[in-house]
Image: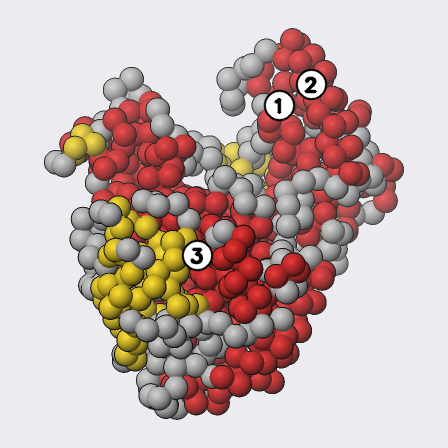
Amino acid sequence: MDFDYSDDQKFLKDEARKFLAARCAPSVVRGVLDDPARSYDTGLWSAVAEQGWLGAAIPEQYNGLGLGRVELCAIAEELGRAVAPIPFASTVYVLAEAVMAHGTDAQKAAILPRIAAGELIGCLAVSEGPGTVTPSALSAKVEGGKLSGVKIPVTDGDAAGMAIVLANEGGRPGLFLVDLKASGVRAETLESLDPTRGVARLTFEGATADRLGEAGQGFELVQAILDRAAVLLAFEQLGGADRCLEMAREYALGRYAFGRVIAGYQAMKHKMADMYVKNEVARSNAYYGAWALDVDAPELPTAAAAARIAASDAFWFASKESVQVHGGMGFTWDVDCHLYYRRSRQLSLVAGSPKLWKERLVSELEKKNAA
Amino acid sequence: MDFNDSPEEAAYREKARAWLAENAAAHRAAHGEPKPTTPEHMAAAKAWQARKAGAGYACITWPAGVGGGGGTPIQSVIFGQEEAKAGVSYGYFTIGLGMCVPTVMAFASDETKQRFVSPAVKGEEIWCQLFSEPAGGSDVAALRTRAVKDGSDWVINGQKVWTTGAHYCDYGIVLVRTDVDAPKHKGLTMFWIDMRDAAVECRPIHQMSGGREFNEVYFTDLRVKDSQRLGAVGEGWKVALVTLMNERLAVGGSSGPDYRQVMELARGLSGPNGPALKDNAFREKLADWYVNSQGLKYTRFRTMTALSRGQTPGPESSIGKIIAANQMQEMANTAVEAQGEYGILTDPSLAPMEAAFQASLMWAPGLRIAGGTDEILKNIIAERVLGLPGDVRVDKDVAFKDMPTGR
């Protein structure tokens, strides 16, 4: 039984934590939060690229480090802990993973080295409005290799150089790679619950579209991409949830009310014990997801769903209750609680809400346990 | 990250499997499969324990010198898994070998250890733990059973409660008050006692579930020798902490239906919008239960990993019972409600799955209390894992006899 980070992976994780403590202090996060013109921190992005993290799981032949997915999970956990204001998930968990899994050799050669070098930011453009996109409602379309339609919201769409777009071609849904710096693309930055991450509306009017993966398989491909991303996002959520518990604990140990520290009151202790329980459930499910992702196990759909559900629940709970433990201070702009509260919403919404993943999980269980 | 045994672990598992295959078959041939709680069941359990002890598979982590296996914690886990697969696990020895005998080994004289440890390992004698009292559940140190010195003996009077297995046990360890003038934690002393003594009376407790699996134990002028004392006079609380440290390892997972059975039930039940399994509210709950069950399963794997690496497991295993007990209650109630008016029936020949959900519904409240209530377990996580302050103790410096008491 070897169901934990290895010593090497722990070392990588510790180094990542030190690096982010030095380069991604709350002031860096707040720099993006308080400046509507910035959707990410370019300095941190370059530094992360120099560390090799963008290409951590990209094979060496494409200038990556060729590490496993568990290493990437360790990095993700630390990024989540630091609420890093960079388009890492969209670029690494989504674009790089999708191209590695579904791209042609030419697409891999064209895209992966640019990601590893920090020259290309990615994004996933699926949503077209409130609610979930369904095959019958999908309106973006590709005709003669040209894409038209509107995608809203697109996480990191304003910073990205390349999008993976879900669109119909000849009446069948497919996925398409679109160069966002070419003609026929307009990106508008939008306001969101989490201003430390970029969100945009992308309008396509005859943009050149290059199909990714099999024709007609758009929705299946999106799900496959999200299965992989969900595990990595779960680690970001887990890192955030653990940090919320730490912040709550530190504050409660220093805050006096009624003549003693509030950390001594059972209502507070039990609230933090509840956070701990949820975080451990999330960690165990996330580890299983990491294993399934790393070895490309057939269990990945259920493992990813369980990891995402547990991590979404843990981060939501820890982030909202951490505000409460901090009392009135927790409700101020100046205390960091809301950075996590906001990020917990961003991470829960960005790859399908927990409700959708619960339905997916039960559907998978039904298949597995069919009577 | 993987789920594979190391080469040494795989070799041990192989050896254990081979031994179990041969010996489980021989054991079944000799004893059949008697019904739980019958004398035949107990005889089979004792025979199996003796067979294991003979091969070094009883108390695997204990030194061979006291009858153990001289092995490692991970070997103990591996054997436990294989034993469960072989379908020959008995619960009678868990508390004695998990909590009581380790306390005896830590505090008794060499003579006492020589007399008792080996017979316990071989299953010849069974031990119980007598701590809880009507006036001391979560607050065990508030217990009132008295031991009074009489010459070189002690005389014990009082009552214990919720003693698992008291009626079939041969010996027990009992925590009693020897000084009412000291504050409550400082006036306690631990003894081992003979459960067959005529001054010890066991009365079954009629539980809310209808069963009678636990006991009240009454002591009326029970005379014990001073040599039966475990630890110094007045040091009983420290001794009890050693016993309780072993409790979390000894108290196993819960039995009863899991999410698979609820799913199977819901597949066959009709609701207002078709099968209950197609109901969205039900599906969301099912997903949460699955995620929690998986969370506990992989948390155990993390604990095993620490053991496998020769490390001390982290505190993560402390989440187990809080989740398992609460989830058992919620699942049972959802399953019962899904049956509609029919859910009220408890006749196993009528109720789905032989009324397993109805039984589980009535058992769950007890599971949320046994081995630490939800609230105590959360205190433990808060204090021992998160390092938060202990509760304010208004009785810490008060002589026991002056402590306020209610019912």
Q: Residues within 10 Å of mark 1 (few under 14, many from 20)?
A: some
Q: In the image, what residue type sits under mark 3? A: Ala
Q: Residues within 10 Å of mark 2 (few under 14, many from 20)?
A: some
Q: Position of residue B319 (x, y in %)?
A: 50, 54
Q: Position of residue A254 (x, y in %)?
A: 50, 86
Q: Label 2: which residue?
A: B21
Q: In the image, what residue type sits under mark 2? A: Ala
- Residue drawn at 53 percent across, 68 percent down: A115
Labelled pair 1, 2 in contact (Cβ < 8 Å): yes
> What scheme was used to colour the molecule?
secondary structure
Q: Would you place residue A258 above or below residue A10 in this image?
A: below
Secondary structure state at the residue bearing disc 1: helix
| Chain where mark 1 sits | B
Q: Would you place residue A172 above or below residue B258 in this image?
A: below
Q: Label 3: which residue?
A: A230
Residue B86 has which mark? 1
Give me the C-alpha separation between circle 3 and circle 1. 38 Å
Task: Kindly report which numbered mark, 3 or 2, lies closer to the viewer in this rendering.
Answer: 3
Residue B322 appears in the figure: no
Residue situated in front as seen by the camera: B45 or B89: B89
Q: Earlier in the sequence, mark 1 or mark 2?
A: 2
- Residue drawn at 45 percent across, 61 percent down: A94
Secondary structure state at the residue bearing disc 2: helix
- Residue drawn at 70 percent across, 49 percent down: B307
Q: Quadrant of residue A145?
A: bottom left
Q: In the image, what residue type sits under mark 1? A: Ala
Q: Would you place residue A232 above or below residue B109 in this image?
A: below
Q: Quadrant of residue A142?
A: bottom left
- Residue drawn at 38 percent across, 54 percent down: A211
Q: Residues within 10 Å of mark 3 (few under 14, many from 20)?
A: many
Secondary structure state at the residue bearing disc 3: helix
